[in-house]
Image (tube, rainbow, N blue to C red):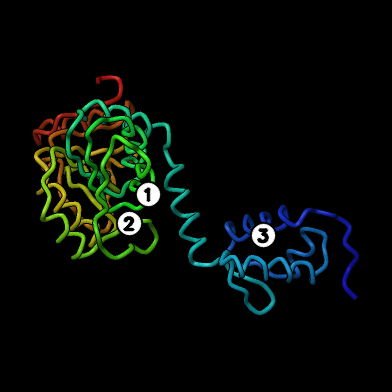
């Protein structure tokens, strides 16, 4: 017989608890979740069935694992939450560079997404982007024209990339390209985690009269998989007030002006 349910949690709460457990662990078992939530194993099986129908989990023998779509959502949400105060301040500083009627390119970074949220009232602005998140953020901005570049959806983030994205960029010219970075090493090299995204970033800079790098201070002193350029490829670096003096000196040596929210 199934154990008597001693903790009458609403179904919605149980489903959320299961999602949270899967966020912390590669998988969960029916038996363990039943004990944790103090309900029967049959109840947990029904809950997992509902989550599978919603494409939140994939059931396994005796339990479930998180669906790939949900893994992506959690991953992207974590990226958005990291250093959020610094990213917002950097975006506000970048907003001061943008004028009415300009054409700008926004890349797929989370800091550029914060910048997109500040552009909804810029009259005559055209935003060119491969980011589904940026396009979604600006789709109802009456003053802004949004050009969503074509391409293949990048695994793990709501972005379009690949040769088609690069080809689409060839037909445009822009006043500014705003880009993020995964890392900046002590030699001034700028890194991305994906080869195709790095190639798209290079093409963006080619098509813009001026380029601006948006990177919080935590990016300095690190490397990532792919070198996508260097500080000398950017006219301006906008970072936060905690940026080390070494980064300021390096940028100036490479003819890249440094701005922080306090210097705008």
For the point 39% across and 60% down, the residue is: 156
Instruction: Tell me whether circle 3 and circle 1 mark residues in contact (CB < 8 Å).
Output: no
Q: Determine whether 127 is above or below 97 in the image.
A: below
User: Upstream in the sequence, badge 3 or badge 2?
Assistant: 3
Instruction: Tell me whether circle 2 and circle 1 mark residues in contact (CB < 8 Å).
Output: yes
Residue 10 lies, in percent from the top left, at: 78, 53
Q: Which residue is mark 2?
A: 159
Q: Which residue is mark 1?
A: 133
User: Upstream in the sequence, badge 3 or badge 1?
Assistant: 3
Residue at disc 2, secondary structure: loop
Q: Nearer the viewer, mark 3 or mark 2?
A: 2
Q: Say left or right for 89 vs 4.
A: left
Number of callouts: 3
| Residue 9 - label | none
Residue 7 lies, in percent from the top left, at: 85, 55
- Residue 258 lies in quadrant: top left
- Residue 199 lies in quadrant: bottom left
For the point 63% across and 71% down, the residue is: 64
For marks 2 and 1, give the CA distance.
8 Å
Q: Determine whether 138 is above or below 151 in the image.
A: above
Tag 3: Cα neighbours inside 10 Å, few (<14), some, or many (≥20)? many
User: Upstream in the sequence, badge 2 or badge 1?
Assistant: 1
For the point 17% across and 42% down, the residue is: 188
Toward the viewer: 63 or 158? 158
Residue 159 lies, in percent from the top left, at: 33, 56
Q: Which residue is mark 3?
A: 18
- Which of the image's four quarters has the C terminus? top left
For marks 3 and 1, give the CA distance.
27 Å
């Amino acid at each position: 017989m199934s154990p008597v349910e001693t903790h009458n949690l609403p179904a919605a709460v149980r489903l959320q608890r299961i999602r949270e457990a899967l966020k912390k662990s590669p998988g969960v078992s029916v038996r363990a979740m039943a004990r944790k939530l103090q309900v029967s194993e049959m109840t947990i099986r029904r809950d997992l069935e509902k989550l599978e129908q919603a494409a939140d989990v994939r059931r396994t023998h005796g339990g479930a694992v998180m669906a790939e779509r949900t893994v992506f959502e959690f991953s992207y949400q974590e990226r958005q939450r990291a250093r959020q105060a610094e990213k917002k301040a950097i975006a506000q500083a970048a907003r001061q560079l943008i004028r009415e009627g300009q054409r700008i390119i926004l890349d797929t970074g989370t800091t550029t997404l914060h910048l997109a949220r500040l552009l909804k009232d810029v009259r005559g602005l055209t935003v060119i982007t491969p980011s589904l998140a940026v396009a979604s953020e600006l789709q109802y901005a009456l003053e802004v024209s949004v050009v969503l570049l074509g391409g293949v959806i990048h695994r793990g983030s709501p972005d379009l990339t690949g040769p088609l994205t690069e080809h689409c960029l060839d037909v445009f010219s822009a006043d500014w390209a705003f880009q993020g970075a995964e890392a900046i090493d002590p030699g001034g090299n700028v890194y991305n985690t994906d080869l195709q995204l790095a190639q798209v970033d290079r093409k963006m800079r080619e098509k813009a009269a001026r380029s601006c790098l948006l990177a919080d201070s935590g990016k300095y002193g690190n490397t990532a998989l792919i070198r996508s350029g260097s500080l000398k490829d950017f006219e301006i670096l906008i970072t936060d007030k905690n940026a080390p003096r070494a980064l300021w000196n390096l940028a100036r040596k490479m003819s890249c002006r440094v701005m922080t929210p306090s210097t705008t």
